[in-house]
Amino acid sequence: MGITRSSASRLRAGSAVAGAALALLATAGAPALAASAGTPAIPAPPAGPAVTADQQSQQSEQSQQSQRSSADRPAVAGAYGKATVPLGISRLAQGAGHDIAITIDDGPDPRWTPQVLKVLRENHVKATFCMIGTRAQQYPDLVRAVAADGHQLCDHSVDHDVTMDHKPVAYQKQQILDGKSMIEKAVPGVAVNYYRAPGGAFTPDSRAIAAASGMRPLGWSVDPKDWSRPGLPAIVATVEGKLPAQPTVLFHDGGGDRSETVAALKEYLPWLAARGYTFTFPKLTTP
């Protein structure tokens, strides 16, 4: 059936009314899509400034940081298997009295590690050596010498990447577990009981990964900054100052000229012994 003249007029009138209504809606800022019958319309959010790619990245990083607080959250802790040691960072020496833990980082080094071992041996001191995986792989005989003298072994990552706490969890896991494997390969059957993050920059994930692998996250409580070669008097002044209870002291046998470290240990270890300190290892259990 054709369209009559009157019906065509009605269609044109209806179109005009609809157009006017749409214009009013647009002017009032109504949403472009009408709500279905019986459903209230949701107003569109007010327009804001454009978000740049850098801002999006920063917002994403802030969101991730808020999701992973410094506390040992069960979701993080359980993601890598059951932890066999506490996730908290150990900064105390074992024992309950006048005890001190000496830790040695960034080796092994063919020049300095034998000298450090000699000083420790002469003073009847057992220490904890935090080794870089690639260095242990390069000098397995030095790893064996450290273990043979009764010192503890600590994983210090594959190659001491001090930015690894800003990198993906998969990368952190690779650095931690591969570093441990490189040390273990040099001394099969000898336990690697600790993990120290490069620069001390732990994350909840890195601590959980280490603990699930049987390594206690290891920090320190006294840092003489011997790695920066501040001079023997400065190193000695720091380590002979007021010590906290059951301190863990940080030294280095790798990463550069460690002659000041060797000299400081020669002076410092007898000084500690004369004051009744007992040399031990860092705590593996709850600090």
Image (spheres, grey):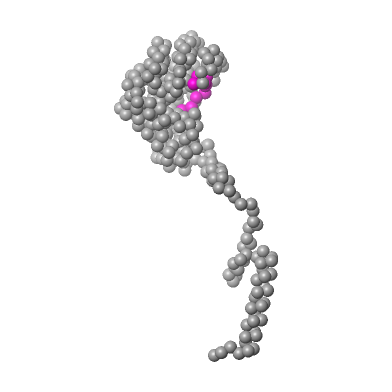
Q: Where is residue 27 drawn, in percent x and y?
A: 69, 66
Estimate the x, y position of residue 165 in percent, counting from the top left: 49, 36
Residues rendered magenta in the picture:
217-227
Residue 104 in view: no
Task: From the viewer's perspective, tell me whether residue 96 is left or right of residue 118.
Answer: right
Identify which residue is drawn at 40% across, 31% down.
158
Residue visible at 52% across and 13% down in the picture: 232
Residue depicted at 65% across the width and 74% down the height? 19
Q: Position of residue 210 (x, y in %)?
A: 42, 34
Q: From what the image shows, is residue 178 above or below residue 228?
A: below
The residue sitting at the left extreme is 188
- Does any portion of residue 165 appear in the rendered image? yes
Q: Is residue 220 magenta?
A: yes
Q: In percent of the image, x 54 and y 20: which residue is there?
A: 244
Q: Is residue 166 above or below residue 254?
A: below
Q: How many marks?
A: 0
Question: Main structural element of the magenta stretch: helix, strand or loop?
Answer: loop
Measured along the vertical axis of the image, is residue 88 above or below residue 274? below
Q: Is residue 194 left or right of residue 28?
A: left
Image quadrant holding the N terminus, namely bottom right
**In-image side of 39 versus 282 (left or right):** right
The verdict on residue 132 being magenta is no
User: Looking at the image, which is closer to me, 75 or 287?
Assistant: 75
Q: Nearest the camera: 124 or 22? A: 22
Q: Position of residue 208 (x, y in %)?
A: 44, 36
